Image (cartoon, rainbow, N blue to C red):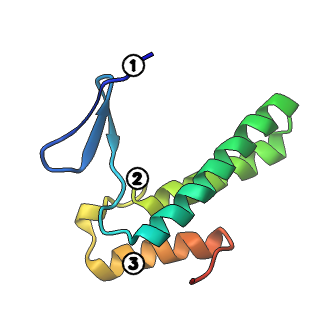
Amino acid sequence: MTRQVTRTDDGRWLVVDGRRWRAADPALPDDVRARLLHHLGVARSAVRSAGRAGDGAALAAARARVQLAKTGLGERGTAWWDQDDAARRARWEAALAALGDGPP
């Protein structure tokens, strides 16, 4: 299955098969982006596992971790283009701290 993926001219949105998704914050340092994407992948895997197991508490916890990672990436919460540099840094640092992944 081939998906059509484009980015809006302003760089704020990805369009996947006609559906618009907020793009990650382009100001994220590469190491921070990698750490947040790692946490996102682990959390999504935990969502699948908890769902298959029918474990509601684990599912809620895994979904909360997905939310934290996506917020850190700038894909959820206050739009990154509406934040100054300090607020953007505070957003991703808070997400990493909440995910148990402090400063490098």
* Residue ID for mark 2: 75
In this rendered view, identify the residue nearer to me: 56 or 51: 51
Q: Residue at x 33, y 46 (%)?
A: 22
Residue 69, compared with residue 56, is above or below; it is below
Q: Residue at x 33, y 82 (%)?
A: 86
Left/right of residue 41 with respect to residue 22 in the rendered view: right
- Mark seen at residue 2: 1
Precedes in sequence: disc 1 or disc 3: 1
Left/right of residue 73 with respect to residue 21 in the rendered view: right
Identify the image quadrant of residue 55.
top right
Between label 1 and label 3, give the one nearer the viewer.
1
* Residue ID for mark 3: 89
Between label 2 and label 1, give the one nearer the viewer.
1
Q: Quadrant of the N terminus?
A: top left
Give the residue type that dot 3 points to: Arg
Mark 2 surroundings within 10 Å by alpha-carbon count, few (fewer than 14), some (14 through 19), many (20 or more): some
CA gap, disc 2 and disc 1: 23 Å
